[in-house]
Image (cartoon, rainbow, N blue to C red):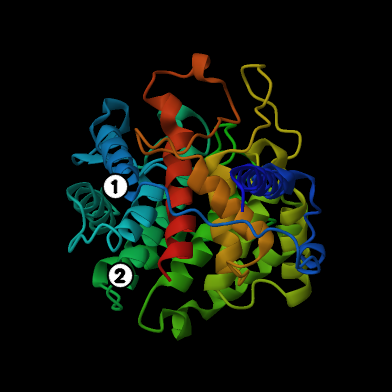
Amino acid sequence: MSATVQRISALAACLLAGIVAVSWHPETRAAEPKDPKALAARPDQPEAKISTSWDQKTAAAYLDQRAAWWMAWPKAARDHETFCVSCHTAVPYAISRPALRRPLAEEAPSANERRLLENVTKRVRLWKEVAPFYSDADRGAYKTVESRGTESVLNALILAANDAQRGQLTNDARMALDNMWAEQQTTGSKKGAWSWLRFANEPWEADDSDFYGATLAAIAAGTAPGNYLTRAEIQNNLTMLREYLNRESAAQPAINRVALLWASAKLPGLLEPQQQKAFIKEILDKQQPDGGWSLSSLVGGWKRNDGTPQEGKSDGYATGLIAFALQQAGISRENPQEKQALAWLAANQNKTEGFWLAYSLNKNEAHHLSPGTALFMNDAATANAVLALTDATHK
């Protein structure tokens, strides 16, 4: 073969390779239909790849640092040398940080995990002595009972989840669960739920957040080891809880139904198969073209109290929680939309600082109390992303 022919052949090969590469560019996925059945029917559709390029070590470091900040923040301090157990930082930390133990080859809980558990245990043991997180005297009507209801659920969730790792229910977790059931409402329109803190802040302290709190109670009870759900003394409580969640589910914003999906995986009987299917479809239909979800799209017409517009971009809080809840509800990690969500999470970690970005539904960053409080949504988002990604990559 002449040198000229060889050069022509080589040039043709390069051009062919370039054409193939362009035709498989990942950005072409954005125009594809999102319906799982439609995707499954397209064998030529390039599959979304679940990247494993997220950094577990920096995620752990971020969560540890933020837990330490919260526990030392003067505004979080409470009586008896304890601190408030927050929905945005402390609880997500307690639930997600143990998931990183295996990938990081850690043999024991981190120092901050131990400190948080000690704090919760102390408040459970001193339940009749410690003051509520907030009181009517300092924060207005109903704050004492709301604080008791909220804390009872959060304490039970944290200690039950910790015991689940060892497979044995401790006396402290049982006491926390007893406190939780004692705070459950037994009459009225909220029968089966708990009085929940209301500070006009979505998604954890708004008028609809008692439903979210009830899902956490269901998760706490369903997570508790030692056949806890079969105990005779809690059967009436469980019935009231199931009836409340079923009765109120249709009126909830989508983000609360995501939490219900998670709870339904822990407490049998919360959702009928057709209900679960409808909720999953509703959630999947809200997925954005980039594979993520925006929290603002899941809370109806909620307006920020500072008057600034809501952020419509995909965020780590919504995407992480949904990806994790769908896995808990039985959606395969091979589902095309779940794959897209996990790929979005892997691609959108701040690899330098370890966190996932999320946006407050109540105020923009400029209107936060401090730079530290402006990170609250990132704290919860990082925890949700860790749960989703570790569930996907370490089963």
Q: Nearer the viewer, residue 51 or 161?
A: 51
**Image x and y of residue 77, in percent:** 27, 33
> Which residue in the protein does label 2 denote?
163
> Residue at 40% across / 67% down in the picture?
394
Above or below, 314 relative to 309: below
Say few, some or many: other residues with alpha carbon within 10 Å of mark 1 (under 14 / 14 to 19 / 20 or more). Answer: some
Q: As shown in the figure, which amino acid type bears the numbered disc 1?
A: Lys
> Which residue in the protein does label 1 denote?
57
Report helix, strand or loop for mark 2.
helix
How far apart are labels 1 and 2 at the CA level? 24 Å
The number of numbered badges drawn on the structure is 2
Residue furthest out toward the top: 366
Above or below, 271 relative to 251: below
Q: Nearer the viewer, residue 140 or 390?
A: 390
> Residue at 67% across / 36% down in the picture?
296
- In the rendered view, does 174 fall on the left or right side of 289? left
- In the rendered view, does 32 fall on the left or right side of 148? right
> Residue at 49% across / 48% down in the picture?
346
Q: Is residue 253 visible?
A: no
Q: As shown in the figure, which amino acid type bears the numbered disc 2?
A: Asp
Residue furthest out toward the front: 2
